[in-house]
Image (cartoon, rainbow, N blue to C red):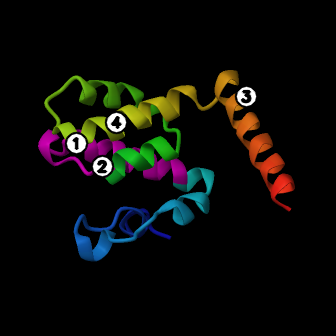
Amino acid sequence: MEINDLIKLIIPPNNRENRDGFSNIHYLNKLTLEEKEKVEDVLINEIKITDKKRIDDLMVDTLGFLRTEKALPLLRDLLDSDVYEDLKIPIITAIYLISNFGTSFYRNILAKLINFYDNSLILSC
């Protein structure tokens, strides 16, 4: 699939008609490594050229979901810039996901949550 067509699927127009109930996770989970890298590059470049007051939070969320380490400098710069306040939480979340997902602390918490839910299912039976 052409990268521009893929981007249109992953980041539809920012309006209620196209975003109400929308999730791009199923598209992101199907990306090949090559597609993932191209999508990351397009999103980073798009954020760089977009007016800081008009940055699409779905682009930021997507970079966080993809754990795009090369986006960290841009995201940190955005956090310190004059982006609109509602975008700061998605930026902080993306930075956290990218920076901490691989740490043993985070993996331990995830393992405990999985164990908790497994035990909850057994107790509810």
**Residue, disc 4:** 91
Q: Residue at x 32, y 37 (%)?
A: 89
Which SS class for mark 3? Answer: helix
User: What's the magenta region?
Assistant: 36-57
Q: Earlier in the sequence, mark 3 or mark 4?
A: 4
Quarter of the image where the C terminus is located: bottom right
Q: Are marks 3 and 2 in contact (CB under 8 Å)?
A: no
Q: Mark 1 — residue?
A: 86
Q: Residue furthest front?
A: 124
For the residues carrying marks 4 and 1, which lies nearer the camera in this image?
Answer: 1
108 relative to 62, above or below: above
Badge 2 amino acid: Asp
Distance, label 4 to label 1, CA atoms, is 9 Å
Main secondary structure type of the part rendered in magenta: helix
Q: Secondary structure at mark 4?
A: helix
Give the residue at mark 2.
57
What residue is drawn where x is 61% and y is 63%?
Answer: 30
Badge nearest the viewer, 3 or 4: 3
Horizontal arrangement in the rendering, residue 121 relative to residue 41 (left or right): right
